[in-house]
Every structure is written in C-alpha cells, then in structure tokens.
Image: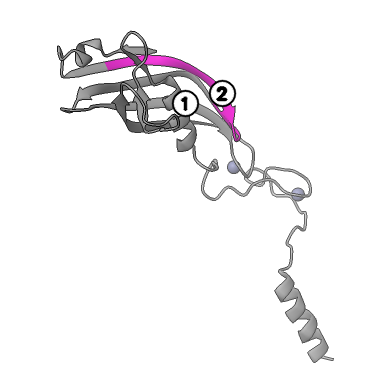
Amino acid sequence: MNINIKSLLCGEKREIEFSYTIPLDYSENGYTVSGDAQVDGSVKDMGGYMQLASECKAQYKTQCARCLKALDGVCSVSFVRTVATKLESEDDEEYLLVGEGSVINIDEAISEELLLSLPFRSLCREDCKGLCPKCGCNKNETECSCVTKELDPRWAALKAFKAKDGE
Ligand SMILES: [Zn+2]
Ligand SMILES: [Zn+2]
C-alpha cells in the first residue's frame, strides 16, 4: 500500500499515521505466512529528516520440528526506517525512498522483516518426544517397543574395555 506523505514534505503536517492490512502469502523455510497482516505506524518530521516507524502482525503456519504436528503462530515485527527523497547508494536498506507522487511503500520491507522474525524452528511443546525413527509413531501419543537407543561411541569403547578387563 502507498502512503502519501505530501503534507509532510511540504511542511503542512509534522506527522502522518497509517493503518492498513495487506494480504500475505508466501512460504519460506517450512513456514507459510498467509492471511491479512495488520500494519500500523507513522511517519514523522524529525526536523531535517523523516522517520518511519511501523509495526506489523502476521499469522503463520508451520509444523513441529520433531513430531510434524501442524502449528499456528503469530509473528510481529516493529522497525524504523529513515525516509529519503534520494538515496546515497542503491543498496541502502535502512532508507526508504520517496517515490513519484510523494508516496512511500513499505510492503516489501514488511515481508523482509517478517521473514527475519520467524523462529529458527518450532516445537509443539518444549518436551515433544518426536517420532520414532523406526516405526514412525508419534511418541507423545503412543509408546512403541522399538529399541532406538544409540550408544554413544565413547561409552561403547568403554564398555568394550570393561569387558576385556573382566576376562
Ligand atoms: Zn511435537
Ligand atoms: Zn517405534
């Protein structure tokens, strides 16, 4: 969505507030961000420069990293950008460029910030037991009798040593 800051640029106003929703739909790293995200913020005349501050809340779907159970979550971000009428260098990400018609657009910045805010992985609960690597059952719900305990190689060596010792 375009935010018109003309009244700020010509000195008519010192602050412009905005609030809108944007539909999001993208997947990344096992997360699907979808639905309408709420965006709120303001652009302020800081005396010599303009600053945009924004907050955004979006819903995501993912699955438990251990048992693959479907999970829903909400991620929220807040960020600040300096608004500039021209950029010093092309790849200055901290700056937002004012486009034609005195508008700025932060939709791309929102998507980027949301992606960065997603957790590295999610668990359905802290102590999720996950799936049995042998039979595939969900160990939170079923107790299978598979023997999956892998011996630590260091312990295996010690065990061998002890066995020899006991000869
Ligand atoms: Zn789980
Ligand atoms: Zn099993």
- Taking 91 as reference, is 55 left or right? left
Q: Quadrant for ligand 1?
A: top right
Magenta stretch: give its range: 18-32
Residue 19 drawn at (x, y percent): 31, 16
Label 2 or label 1, whichever lies nearer to me, is 1
Screen quadrant of the C terminus: bottom right
The residue tagged 1 is: 111
Verify CB contact (< 8 Å) between mark 2 and mark 1.
Answer: yes
Residue 13 drawn at (x, y percent): 15, 14
The residue tagged 2 is: 26
Q: Residue furthest front?
A: 88
Residue 91 drawn at (x, y percent): 45, 32
In the picture, residue 153 is in which quadrant?
Answer: bottom right
How far is disc 2 from disc 1 in space, using C-alphas?
9 Å
Q: Residue at x 53, y 43 (%)?
A: 120
- Taking 61 as reference, is 74 left or right? left
Q: Residue at x 73, y 67 (%)?
A: 151
Taking depth in this image into account, of 128 and 156 the one nearest to the observer is 156
Residue 61 drawn at (x, y percent): 54, 29
Q: Main secondary structure of the magenta part?
A: strand
The residue under label 2 is which amino acid type? Tyr
The residue under label 1 is which amino acid type? Ser
Q: Residue at x 18, y 28 (%)?
A: 48
